[in-house]
Image (cartoon, rainbow, N blue to C red):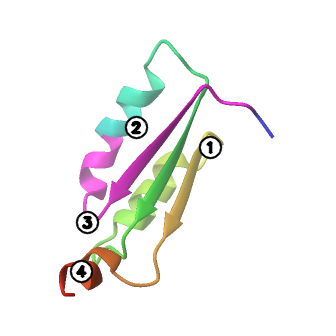
């Protein structure tokens, strides 16, 4: 297990079309000892697949997907 200096959490919901810019910004930082956790909140578009394709060769990025839209569930309570 690698020790990272920084952990970054990215919450995603239907924003896969913006992720490439976010990814490029992160990988172009001076500090490279970071990990990124991306949490997809059950997007209804192809965001999960888009992000998965972008990060597939970079093991600093981990992608997770909620089984249900938790934000919608919390807001409806």
Distance between the Cα atoms at labels 3 and 4?
13 Å
- Residue 23: image quadrant is top left
* Residue span colored magenta: 3-20
Picture quarter with the N terminus: top right
Residue at the disc numbered 1: 57
Q: Secondary structure at mark 1?
A: loop
Task: Give the number of the mark in front: 1 or 3.
Answer: 3
Q: Position of residue 12 (x, y in %)?
A: 33, 59
Depth check: 3 or 31 in front?
3
What residue is pinned by disc 4? 72
Residue that lies at the very extreme toward the left in this rendered image: 76
With respect to residue 25, does 37 lie above or below?
A: below
Magenta stretch: includes residue 57: no
Residue 7's tag is: none
Asked if the magenta segment contains residue 9, the reply would be yes
Task: State the CA–CA distance, disc 2 to disc 3.
Answer: 16 Å
Disc on the earlier residue, 4 or 2:
2
| Quadrant hosting residue 59 | top right
Binning the other alpha carbons within 10 Å of mark 4 as few (below 14), some (14 to 19) or many (20 upward) gives few
Q: Is residue 65 left or right of residue 32?
A: left
Labels 2 and 3: the sequence-earlier one: 3
Q: Earlier in the sequence, mark 1 or mark 3?
A: 3
Coordinates of residue 48 in the picture (x, y in percent): 42, 66
Which of the marked residues, 3 or 4, is nearer the chain's N terminus? Answer: 3
| Residue at the disc numbered 3 | 14
Q: Position of residue 73 (x, y in %)?
A: 28, 85
What distance separates the C-alpha of mark 1 from that of mark 2? 12 Å
Are the residues flagged by discs 4 and 1 in contact, CB closer than 8 Å? no
Name the disc covering residue 23, or none.
2
Q: Secondary structure at mark 4?
A: helix
How many labels, in total? Answer: 4
């Amino acid at each position: 297990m690698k020790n990272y200096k920084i952990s970054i959490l990215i919450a995603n919901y239907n924003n896969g079309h913006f992720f490439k810019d976010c990814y490029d910004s992160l990988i172009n930082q001076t500090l490279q000892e970071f990990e990124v956790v991306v949490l997809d909140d059950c997007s209804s578009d192809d965001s999960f697949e888009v992000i998965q394709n972008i990060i597939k060769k970079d093991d600093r990025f981990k992608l997770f997907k909620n089984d249900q839209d938790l934000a919608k569930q919390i807001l409806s309570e």
